[in-house]
Image (spheres, rainbow, N blue to C red):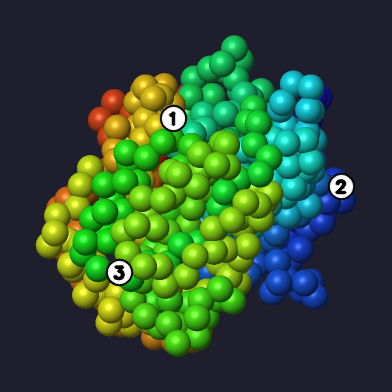
Amino acid sequence: MAITTLDSGAPGTVTADLQTLRARLKGELITAEHANYDDARATLYDSSRFPLAVVRVKCAEDVVEAVNFARRHGVLVAVRSGGHSLAGYSVADDAIVVDFSRMKQVTVDPVTGTARVQAGATSFDLAGPAHEHGLALSTGDTQSVGIGGLTTGGGIGFMVRKYGLAIDNLLSAEVVMADGRVVTASEREHPDLFWGIRGGGGNFGIITEFTFRLAPVDHILGGDLLLPATPEVIRGYLDYAVSAPEELTLIANVMLAPPAPYVPEDRVGELVLSVLTTWCGDLEEGQRAIAPLRSLATPVADAIAPMPYPAIYRFTEHLTEPHQASIRMMFADDLSDTSVQAILDAVGYPSSPYSLVQLRGLGGAFGRVEADATAFAHRDRQYFVAVIGVWLDPDEDRAPHEAWTASLWDVLRPEGEGVYVNFLEEEGNERVRQAYPGRTYDRLQEVKRAYDPENLFRLNQNIRPR
């Protein structure tokens, strides 16, 4: 691809060059005077930030133009795929926002079992076209999560125990670099960059398109199983979540039973363990694999049934609506009885009825990848544990909800090791290093120095080049 790179020393004011940038784009440049500015700057979690401009890119060349403008004027670069950044990095004050909402094309090749996916596509955008060919990729567990941010952080999804992380199925990526070049990263081309973008976030460039290997998945046995939340039920779940056949991936939430259509009205608000289940394999075998969960206690509700894979997203559809959150996350190999009881106590008396604690079982294909094969280094951990304070009103005082999260986090944290970078808020460099322990961080720094030595791409969980 032939791209003209602007001279970083070229003259001109920001205002004048914004007009030049607008003229060069195939997409749209939205600035403060634009009628759609407020919509363009709003994300799932935030509408309080005021960027210099939002560039709704339509092609890689548009991304290059935006990057060159930002480098030339020393302007921050924010990258927005699905807008789910917990730390708020999708939009920033006075930044150029590279918005991929118009780059959502998905091209599935059923012969090779691969898909080319533009960075603005969401998990659901991919799930539908792939399903038409009996294929799927294990991606995020909310349909509106952008493939761009999800994948660069790792990509823990509905089938992680059977098919690993999204990055484990990434074959190549088209990347716009800090100097305006467009390169392909793969095992053969720029392999150091390819290693870094598989888990290292947006530190090294802006990915415009991914090529994935898909898995043969058509119908699954999936849905929500609500059990009474007791110490015995949670312990039974934790034991089974990591010992079950790897075709079974479980995402459990200790929460108050929601007013879902399948929940009896008189049980709404009851403390439950909601086990979101995905079995990808023979459906009769799946029923046998799920039986130990059903036997833990008499279910409050059982909505597990055969379904097309994309239908599993119905169970998390409510998470696509704007809301506020205070989150702390860790990986763990076990949880003590003290921690289990603390979870039950906290969720039983939350600051918001929507708050929860999420417990995911790992292992299987996730754990068979060597820790140093990608920038995601936590392959030997057993559990994903997240304290998630959620409330709906953006004008509501954050303090009580953040205090609820912090109080429970203080109890759980000593039993954890490491953190999933996609579940980090702005928590400081110590937590970034927990996401990238030891040699992983050092190696990421080497890649950063090679591809972004001036740290142009720093609105992320940042790896400092020096």
Q: Which mark is residue 26?
A: 2
Helix, strand or loop under label 1: helix
Asked if marks 2 and 3 touch (Cβ < 8 Å), the reply is no
Residue type, label 2: Lys
Which of pointers 1 and 2 lies earlier in the amino acid sequence?
2
313 vs 68: above or below? below
- Tell me if residue 50 can be seen: no
Residue at mark 1 to residue at mark 2: CA–CA distance: 41 Å
* Residue at the (17%, 61%) spot, across then down: 339
Q: Which mark is residue 229?
A: 3
Q: Is residue 225 left or right of residue 292?
A: right
Q: Is residue 123 left or right of residue 297?
A: right
Q: Is residue 308 left or right of residue 196?
A: right
246 vs 408: above or below? above
* Residue at the (43%, 76%) spot, across then down: 257
In x, y percent, where is residue 29?
78, 58
Q: Nearer the viewer, residue 228 or 51?
A: 228
Asked if marks 1 and 2 touch (Cβ < 8 Å), the reply is no
Image quadrant containing the C terminus? top left
Helix, strand or loop under label 3: loop
Q: Which mark is residue 365?
A: 1
Q: Residues within 10 Å of mark 2 (few under 14, many from 20)?
A: few
154 vs 446: above or below? below
Which of pointers 3 and 1 lies earlier in the amino acid sequence?
3
Residue type, label 3: Ala
- Tell me if residue 365 can be seen: yes
Helix, strand or loop under label 2: loop
In x, y percent, where is residue 191?
53, 17
In x, y percent, where is residue 138?
57, 40
Residue at mark 3 to residue at mark 1: CA–CA distance: 29 Å
Residue at mark 2 to residue at mark 3: CA–CA distance: 53 Å
